[in-house]
Image (spheres, rainbow, N blue to C red):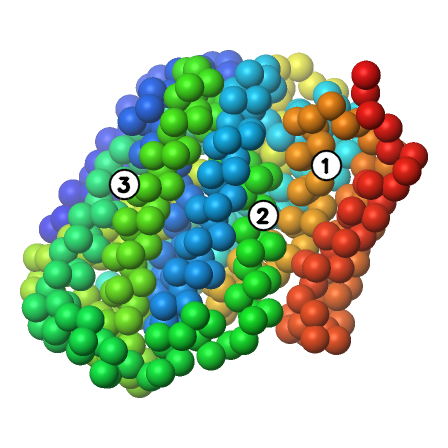
Amino acid sequence: MTVAVVYALFLLYAVLRLFRRPAETEADYIVAGRRLTLPAFVATLVSSWYGGILGVGEYAWSYGVSNWLVFGVPYYLYAVVFAVFLARRARRSQVLTLPELLQDRYGRAPALLGAATIFVMTVPAAYVLMLGVLVRMATGWPLWLGVTLGAVLSLAYVLRGGLRAIVGTDMVQFALMFLGFAVLVPVCVAEFGGWGYLRDALPAAHLSWSGGRGFQAVAVWYVIAAATLVEPAFYQRCYAARDERTARRGLFVSVGFWIVFDFLTTTAGLYARVALPDLDEPLAAFPRLAAEVLPPVWRGLFVTGLLATIMSTVDSYAFVAAVTGGRDIWSRLRGGDEAASLRAARLALPIVGALSIGLALWSGSVVKLWHHLGSVGTPVLLLPVLAAHTRWRPSGRRVTASMAASGAVSLAWLVLGGGEPWLGMEAIFPGVAVSALVMLSPTARRCP
C-alpha cells in the first residue's frame, strides 16, 4: 500500500500548507477568487461529481449495462443542457451560492428553504460510507473507524483553504481515478477475455437496458438526474471560473471525461459479476475484483484511485453543505457580516462531518441514499432555480408554497411506500407535479 501512503502524505502536506495560508475573504474561500482555469475547472468538476464509485460498482454488479443508462446517460444530457443554457448566466451573476441567488430573485423565505434542502442533499453521507467500506476492506478495521478516519482526512484541508484547497487536491485525484481503472480493465480483458466472454458468462438481464428491473426503475433516474440543473457543485465551479467561456467549455469537456470513465467502470462492474458471482456485499465489487486480478503494487494503485475518487467528492459536498448551513442559514438568520459568515461556514464543517458519519452508519446502501435524497430534494429546487435564470418571476410567496408543498408530498410518498414506489409510482414524480402546479398557475407573472 505504498501508493496509498504517498497519497496520504500528499494530503497531510496540503493540510499543513493551507493552515499557514488560510483564505481570508468569502470570494476567496467559497469560489477561489473566481480564477479557475479550464484544466482546473475540468479536474475539480470531473472528480468531485464522481465520488459514488462504489455505488456504481454496486449497481453495475447487480444490474449490468443498465448502470450506464441509469448513472451515465441522463447526467450527460442534463450536464449538456446546463452548459448550453445555464453556465454563462451563472458565471455572469455576482452571487457566491445558490441560496444567495434565490434570495436575490424571490426573497428570504425561498432562500432559507432552498438552503435547507441543499444542506440535506449535500451532506456527503453516501460518500463517507464508501470511504468506510474501502478502509475496512484495506485494513480490516471496523466500519465506524474507517468512516470516521475517512471523513476527518477528507475535510482537514478544506477547513482553512476552502475551494482552492479542494481544487488543488482534485488535480491529483483526477489523475488517480482514471489511472486506477485504466489499469484494472485491460488486466481483466487479458485475464478473462473480451466482449464475447462477457456475453456468454453474464446473466441475460445484465445485458438488457433495464437490468431486469423494468421501465420505471430506470426512468426515475432520468427525473432524479434533473438535479444536475440545480447541482450546487456545478454552480460553484461556474461562479469560480475565470470567465463565461471557461465555465461553458469546461462542462462540455467534463462530459467527455465522464463518458470515458463510465465506460471503464461499467466494464469493470461486468467483470466483477463474472469473477465474483456470489459476492455478499455488492458495494465492494470493485475492490474485490482488484484483489482477485491485480498484483500487489497495481492493487495499491487501484485502491488509492478509488480512495481519491471518493475523497474528492466528500470534501466538495461537505464544503457546500458547510457554506450553506453556516453562511446561508445560520449567518443569514443572525444577520452577520462577511467575517461572521466566513467563521460560521468554517465552524459548520465539523458539524457536517459528524452528521455525515452518523447517516453513513445508519444507512447500509449508497444507492438508496442517492435515491431518497434526490427524490425529495429535486422537486423542491428544480423549478425555482431554473426560473431564477429567466425573465419569468413568480412571487416569493408562490415559490415558497411550491417548495414546501413539493418537498412535503415527495417525503410523504417516500415514507408511505417504505422507500419503495407507493401506489406503483416513485416519490419524485408527484413532487415535481405539485411544484409545477403551484409554480405555473395563472397568477405567476412575467417581468417586462
Instruction: Report which residue position mark 3 lands on.
Output: 173
Residue at screen point 42% across, 19% down: 245
The answer to whether 256 appears left or right of 92 in the picture is: left
Asked if 268 appears above or below 351 in the picture, the reply is below
Query: Is residue 119 or residue 423 the one in the foreground?
Result: 423
Residue 439 seen by the camera: yes
- Gap between marks 2 and 3 measured at Cα: 26 Å
Asked if 382 appears above or below 421 in the picture, the reply is above
The quadrant of the image that shows the N terminus is bottom left
Instruction: Report which residue position mark 2 lands on.
Output: 226
Q: Secondary structure at mark 2?
A: helix
Q: Position of residue 80 (x, y in %)?
A: 47, 38
Asked if 95 appears above or below 171 in the picture, the reply is above
Marked residue nearer the N-terminal end (1 or 2):
2
The answer to whether 249 appears left or right of 115 in the picture is: left
Instruction: Report which residue position mark 1 lands on.
Output: 384
Query: Is residue 346 or residue 128 the one in the foreground?
Result: 128
Residue at screen point 9% across, 72% down: 191
Amino acid carrying mark 1 in the image: Pro
